[in-house]
Image: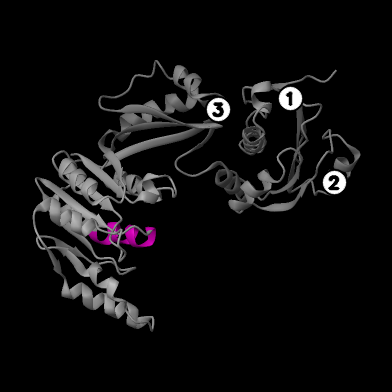
Amino acid sequence: MKVEMLSTGDEVLHGEIVDTNAVWLASTFYEAGYAMTFRTTSGDSLATLVETLKQRSQVADILVVNGGLGPTSDDFTSQAAAQAAGVGLVRNEQWLTQIRAFFSRRGSEMADINLKQADIPETAEMLPNGNGTACGFRLQLNDCQIFFTPGPPSEFQLMITEQVLPRLRHLCPAPEKLLCLRLTTFGRGESFIASQLTDIVLPAGVTLGYRAAAPIVEVKLSGQEAQRAEMQACWQTIKTLMHDYLLFEGKSDFATEITTLLKAQQYQLQLLEGFSAGLLCWTLSSAQAPLRSALTVGHQGSVGSKGLEAYLSDSDSTDTLSITISELINGGFIEFRLVTPEQNYFFKVSVSESLTASPARLQAIIVVQAMYLVHRWLTGQTVQIIYQGLNRVEET
């Protein structure tokens, strides 16, 4: 089954906005068993949109078209759909009543330009919009079921959930539920991670994929739900090989993983940041990690400075973990200190020139490395520096 998405709008095509609807739909459809096979984008050109609809309808079994159902002059998806199908537009009185009610509930008068939002191709099925005035619709073109949806995410997601997916399950039952096992690694690049997994023997029809988004690499094992037992056996081998580089499994994020561990073990964090300039605090705060205190300082040099020692001595060692990151010392060194109830860990590392050349990238790496130290301690593993390009300097 070929499942496609067509996003519309100059703002999407020219990169003025991020197409979050496409990401959400791909994930939602995958979990429902309808894996996306192709995605494309069309600008605000009627001729281009008509041609694209004709072309993709000859390839896809299911096509979701997103955007262009608004009231303004550059919204002509309904018109393009009618032209592609060789039919006229008709005003859907049922939806027009809904639009009028929408404005009435808000105590405002409906403008005449909103009338066009009730116009759909005469052979189409209307799909109600529970969050707005844009009328969605379903149209069959060639052998393709095409679903036309509004652009605003709150309207789009509700329509997919309440209108599109139920019809898909009736018209095109998913052959098998899909399964994707994921883990996120840190410390090495995509080519290194892939080389470590080269000899993995995969079950028939199962694929191993990678997604690099510095400074992490995601490993994905994809197949059918019916293959879960075989995939899990293979997955255990992958996790063993990735042991030192493994941050977390699933679709969560590292800060959330650490937050869960901290709360479960009843610890709070105390942060002192130099080079990371508050990025570690922001990352953990966004995941609602239990922070006792956080301080950002500049030009403090070594983690072993007197001011830092005084700051650390204020912590309650029974329920507080302290993590500190120094400034970039002498242009090429950074120090980490992790203070736990059981042991203090100190790491001085030399930073490779390729990393110092990009301060923003280095900040992101330093933050994940600091969280890695905390995570390793919380999970009872060896606390160590792992990222390639951060080379530990042994103190003499």
Residue 1 lies in the magenta stretch: no
Q: In the image, what residue type sits under mark 1?
A: Val
Q: Quadrant of the N terminus?
A: top left
Nearest to the eye among marks 1 and 3: give it. Answer: 1
Left/right of residue 311 with respect to residue 8 in the rendered view: right
Count of numbered tags: 3
Is residue 30 shown above or below 75?
above
Q: What residue did someone put label 1 on? A: 349
Q: Secondary structure at mark 1?
A: strand
Q: Secondary structure at mark 3?
A: helix
Q: From where the camera sits, is residue 27 visible?
A: yes
- Label disc, if present, on residue 206 of the rendered structure: none
Q: What residue did someone put label 2 on? A: 311
Q: Earlier in the sequence, mark 1 or mark 3?
A: 3
Q: Earlier in the sequence, mark 3 or mark 2?
A: 3
Left/right of residue 305 with respect to residue 50 in the rendered view: right
Q: Earlier in the sequence, mark 1 or mark 2?
A: 2
Instruction: Residue 134 in the image: state x and y as whole percent.
Output: 28, 66
Quadrant in which residue 235 is drawn? top left
Is residue 216 shown above or below 307?
above
**Residues packed near mark 3 inside 10 Å, few (<14), some (14 to 19) or many (20 plus):** some
Q: In the image, what residue type sits under mark 3?
A: Tyr
Instruction: Residue 381 in the image: state x and y as whole percent.
Output: 62, 30
Contact flag, marks 1 and 2 (Cβ < 8 Å):
no
